Every structure is written in C-alpha cells, then in structure tokens.
Amino acid sequence: MSDTPAPQSKKEIIAAAEKAVTDIAAAKAAIGKVIFGQQEVVERVLITLLAGGHALLVGVPGLAKTKLVETLGTVLGLDANRIQFTPDLMPSDILGSEVMEEDAAGKRGFRFIKGPVFAQLLMADEINRASPRTQSALLQAMQEYHVTIAGERHDLPAPFHVLATQNPLEQEGTYPLPEAQLDRFLMQVDVPYPDIDAERQILFETTGETEAAAEQTLEPGELQPLQKLVRQIPVGESVVEAILELVRSARPEDNDSEATRHISWGPGPRASQALMLTVRARALLDGRLAPSIDDVMALAGPVLQHRMALNFSARAEGVTVRSVIADLKSKWM
C-alpha cells in the first residue's frame, strides 16, 4: 500500500476530496480524448478502480473495450499487462512457473518466473474464451492479492486490479465464467454501441493521418490515497438501509415477491460490500462528500446483475436479470 497517510479530520478529508475531484476530472478528460461516446462506461470503470475492485466489461467485439483498459493504464500511471485469453491458455501462462536452473558450481535449484498477473492493472482480454480451469487461475489473485506456486506465496503489486473483457456468451468458442469468479468482480459494465454522433467522431478521429494518444495525469502511487479517501466518505443510515433492503430483496429465500419468484439464487454479502464502496466512489466522482439513494439505484444493475441467476421458468417467459433488478428498484423510484 502507499505510504501516503490518509486524512483524519473532517477538514483534511474535505481538502483531500477537493483535490481528488480535480485529479479525477483531469483523468476523465484525458480518457475522453481517446475513448469517444462511452461516458457512462468510463465512469463505471473509474468508480471500480476508485473503490479498489475489479470490473468485467461485456460487449460485442469492436467497442473499444481493450483500448479503454490500455488508456486507463496510461492515464492513471499504472504498470499494466495484457493477457489474450485463448482456449489453449494454461494457468501457468497467467501466474508463472518454476524452472530448474544450474549455477556455475553445478548446483541445481528452482527459480520462480513471474507471469503477467504480476502487474498493477491486468487486462484479461476475452476472458471467457479460455477454459474454466484457466479462468479459475485468477480466483486467488483477485481475492487475496497473492498467488501460491509450489507452496510458496508470491505477493502481487499494489494496487492490483483486473479489468476483464468478455464477449456475449451467445458467440461461438466462449465458456461461462464460474460463479465464484463472477462474484469477485465488483461490477459488470455493459458496453453498448455508440450513438450516431459518437460514431461519427470515431470515424474522423481514428481514420486520419494521426490518432490521439493517451496522456498520463496521475503519478504512480496517487491512486491508492484516492482509494483510502473513498473508504472514509460517510454513508448515511438511509443509504445503508437502501443497500441492505435492495440486496436482500434479491434473495428468493428471504422474500416471496413477484420479482424473486424468477430468481434461482441471489447476491451474497459481497454485493452489499460492493454497493457500499461504489456509491462512495460515485459520490466522489461527482464532487459530493456523501452518497445518496440515487447512487444506490444507479449502481444496482452493474453490481447485482452478475451475482444473480434466473430459474428456468423465468427464461422460458423471456424475463431478464435487468428487468428483475428494475422491479426490485421500483420501490425507491
């Protein structure tokens, strides 16, 4: 973790928040020079990083998901690596492996060679094209921030974030992510097609002689103090109650409502934790010192949709996870 002390007093927190708002605005502006027409996507990924989590970006090919992750690494001053997930990718290709070496005296021993997971920002490109066994290689890293190879623990750099891209499951050559791994993603960020104005800008900006390049706005080590600041932002009791009621209302064993009759299994406590962190980060992103229920409603979909599964009858009726979440949110709308 960074050695920068976290602000303690209310005055220090306000001063730190004001500087953070300026820094985040500069980062958003730098990203906007490269990524066009995806403001909501950019904001949700920034919220994920400010909250200290991982994000799963879902969309068809060609929507600049990979370019967004590369741009974030540059703008935020993070050491970044990229893994292209393929069906023949092995866990050792991600984590690293031990190799036997012989020194000048003829003595043999094993040396660990680090894999690409040892980075501050790991782009797992098309993660659902690898087998479930290889996908699961990231489970320990995403939750515990270290990996164990041959019984030895190897700590990952701090901060450590996984931004994975995923093609829709309907496409050929894809495998569904294990539920345990999905739960480790703070948010699922759906990447839509750009509107016509954004697509027109993309045509002109990317097909000329020169193309805009990302510029760094944060120095290495500046992201962690922002993450500490997010955890110090106070959350009102009404917001806490909204988080608890919303998450618990998505569990069929706790409710017997019209919405929950479509749910096979619902979100666990990690969803509540994710909402607590992301609503704080969203407030800071907007220049506010406290989150509101509107923040909870805005982030309910990205936080809950990959932590729920519908039953057979719901799928037969054409019910979607998004429509179920919308029904659950209607109480506060």
Image (cartoon, rainbow, N blue to C red):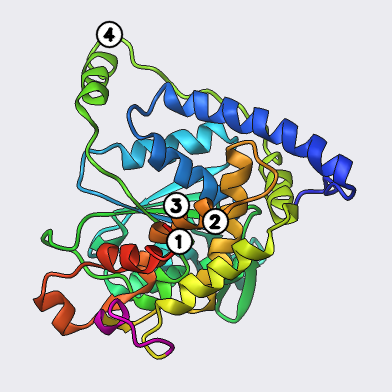
Q: Earlier in the sequence, mark 1 or mark 4?
A: 4
Which kind of residue does numbered mark 2 sit on?
Ile
Q: Which label sits in the foreground, 1 or 4?
A: 1
Within 10 Å of disc 4 (Cα), the crowding (few <14, some 14-19, many 20+) is few
Q: Earlier in the sequence, mark 4 or mark 3?
A: 4
Which kind of residue does numbered mark 4 sit on?
Glu
Say if residue 59 shows up in the picture: yes
Q: Which mark is residue 332?
A: 1
Q: Secondary structure beneath disc 2? A: helix
Q: Earlier in the sequence, mark 2 or mark 1?
A: 2
Residue at label 4?
209
Give the magenta-colored segment's residue range: 254-262
Q: Which label sits in the foreground, 2 or 3?
A: 2
Gap in Å between the C-alphas at discs 1 and 4?
50 Å
Q: Can you give x and y, in whole percent of width and height, for residue 116 in the image?
A: 48, 54
Which kind of residue does numbered mark 1 sit on?
Trp
Q: Which label sits in the foreground, 2 or 4?
A: 2
Q: Dots 2 and 1: beta carbons under 8 Å?
A: yes
Q: Which label sits in the foreground, 4 or 3?
A: 3
Residue at label 3?
298
Q: Earlier in the sequence, mark 2 or mark 3?
A: 2
Q: In percent of the image, x 47 and y 68: which residue is there?
A: 184
Is 5 positioned to the left or the right of 200 in the image? right
Q: Judge by depth and name the residue closer to the eye, 70 or 274.
A: 274
Which kind of residue does numbered mark 3 sit on?
Ala
Q: In percent of the image, x 86 and y 46: which residue is there?
A: 10
Q: Can you give x and y, in whole percent of width and height, for residue 71 in the image?
A: 45, 33
